Amino acid sequence: MEKICGAVRLSPESSTTARLLLPLTRNLSRQHGVVSFNRLVGVRLPHRHLTSLTALTTHCSPSPSPLVSASVATETSAIVIDGKAIAKQIRDEITEEVSKMKNAIGVTPGLAVILVGDRKDSATYVRNKKKACESVGINSFEVRLPEDCTEQEVLKFISDFNDDPSVHGILVQLPLPSHMNEQNILNAVSIEKDVDGFHPLNIGCLAMRGREPLFVPCTPKGCIELLHRYGINIKGKKAVVIGRSNIVGMPAALLLQREDATISIVHSRTKNPEEYIREADIIISAVGQPNMVRGNWIKPGAVIIDVGINPVEVSRNLWSFASYLIISLTASVATETSAIVIDGKAIAKQIRDEITEEVSKMKNAIGVTPGLAVILVGDRKDSATYVRNKKKACESVGINSFEVRLPEDCTEQEVLKFISDFNDDPSVHGILVQLPLPSHMNEQNILNAVSIEKDVDGFHPLNIGCLAMRGREPLFVPCTPKGCIELLHRYGINIKGKKAVVIGRSNIVGMPAALLLQREDATISIVHSRTKNPEEYIREADIIISAVGQPNMVRGNWIKPGAVIIDVGINPVEDTKSPRGYRLVGDVCYEEACKVASAITPVPGGVGPMTIAMLLSNTLVSAKRIHNFQ
Ligand code: NAP
């Protein structure tokens, strides 16, 4: 196993301002096509740092025994990541780029800062940001409003800055006075000028694969920048983020996962956080609890990015290997146990019955029938079957369905025209574009065109962003992961405080499933194709949601006795005995797992029927919301 040597610390206040300036220049490059942001990112570590890191690495035994490593660790002196120096380097690069831009097109980047109230700390932050702007040649605009001003006044300034061509970034200093709705205010900042990266649309794109946020929140971006500039490899590493706040923990975890780390997110409801931390190659701590992370919680050689306001003192002589986790669970331990079979078909029927009743109530009370529009492009047989099933399901509960079938070679514009018509049609409360689309179409453009109020699939990045953020509520949650959680709820399975592993990180299942579990206070780890030894994570889990698409990948001896398994996988395997020549199996080897787990979904008949039930539920919820019907 490759080891990272040398614990690394970031002093908390080190590069805050540089982190803010980076997205601002990036924004300008987008608007004016001049500044090359990549140059900033591509700069390598100063030679002396590389040398010391390499020297430390060679001290490590390639596969250290605990004892050897412990002694290695005590001799090793951690490299201190010098955030101040890196921030200066970045500011120098920005100064050069800003000047180039002025000379080339006569444009000076501009940052507007809005400060409400008279908190001393906020005033200091704003003053520092202003000074930093001046130092690199960026214009700064400042608005100070009294503590008792109204939300409308703040919104008016934001709107003016949104329209002002000399402003390229807008920052509202947090926290706002308690009588203001932070969400309304942050959402009002134009997405193109959201240099803080806090808009849920930016967060949604950060969470989704294949999407690129316009901006990434400054502090977590700074953490990753430090790892990059110190040449620290992230891919394939075990990373733990401590804290799940909207501004640091959550986006830091998403950024690490984008770089192919396997992440676990520890928070205040996590039992025994040290168990996760001891396993990590990279730790980003954003808790604000002084000295919470102790030396003997740290794997020797781990890289530590300490974002805490109270710097954590990591004393090297406390490093110890005494608490390595020993995993010795085998299927044989629990051969006597027979798992409860989670009957998705029965639960889905129960939900459909409830929906039928609600739809009928709504018709009688206000004369409105919920309506679902489905757009199918091309003639894939599986897609046609899914659409047919959705239509049938709508009929069975009394929801109207509208179907548009377009030929494989139709244009993106034609699809967009139908979406636009459905967006405007008051009898349609949900719009679903059957995926996959033909390859000549841009899926992102098409899904983004669906009105957020009718996005019953929950795939719009704004919905995903709200799902990822604490204190935000998505209008819709993607159907399959919602169905998984619904099964856990209806079987009375407690999620809070549990260890949950999600296998797979797709936009439609894995990623939103993990976000949902975390919203319910599970401590999540997300395993994907770049995870080394996935079984190590899976063996620790109380709840496993698997969405991989690999038949029988998860074996019985990968499962902790008593774990709950939700198997989303639907995989055809050859079966000569079946009239179709194949049968469907899950990602989890059912025959083995049902002897170890306490509850398990079968395939078929588990998660599958729940997806359509959740689609019907989302359509009903949408109709109720649009017509304000309780
Ligand atoms: P997907 O987009 O192909 O994503 C698969 C995920 O699994 C990826 O994140 C991938 O990692 C990860 N993965 C692949 N091989 C792995 C391995 N050996 N170890 C660990 N992780 C691995 O698939 P999806 O759309 O999420 O669907 C997953 C499964 O669920 C499929 O069988 C699908 O048919 C089924 N499904 C069922 C329903 C339902 O209603 N029941 C709905 C949707 C999907 P990378 O990200 O690194 O590539």
Image (tube, rainbow, N blue to C red):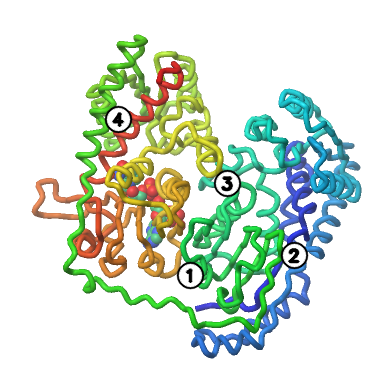
Residue 547 lies, in percent from the top left, at 36, 52
**Mark 4 sits on what residue?**
387
Give residue 279's position: percent from left, percent from top: 50, 71
Q: In which quadrant will I find the C terminus? A: top left
Frontmost of labels 1 and 3 is: 1
In this rendering, the count of numbered labels is 4
- CA neighbours of label 3 inside 10 A, class few (<14), some (14 to 19), many (20+): many
Q: Is residue 630 above or below residue 201?
A: above
Q: Earlier in the sequence, mark 1 or mark 3?
A: 3
Instruction: Please say whether residue 357 is visible from this viewpoint.
Output: yes
Which label's residue is closer to the chain start, 3 or 4? 3
Question: Helix, strand or loop at disc 3?
Answer: helix
Query: Which amino acid does the dot numbered 4 rest on?
Result: Val
| 304 with respect to 563 (left or right) | right
Residue bearing the label numbered 2: 11
Residue 240 figure quarter: bottom right
Kind of element beneath mark 2:
loop
Mark closer to the chain start, 1 or 4: 1
C-alpha separation, residue under disc 2 versus residue under disc 4: 54 Å
Q: Evaluate if marks 1 and 3 touch, with contact meaning CB atoms under 8 Å apart.
A: no
The residue furthest top is 367
Residue 18: where, in percent of width, then height? Answer: 79, 53
What distance separates the C-alpha of mark 3 from that of mark 4? 30 Å
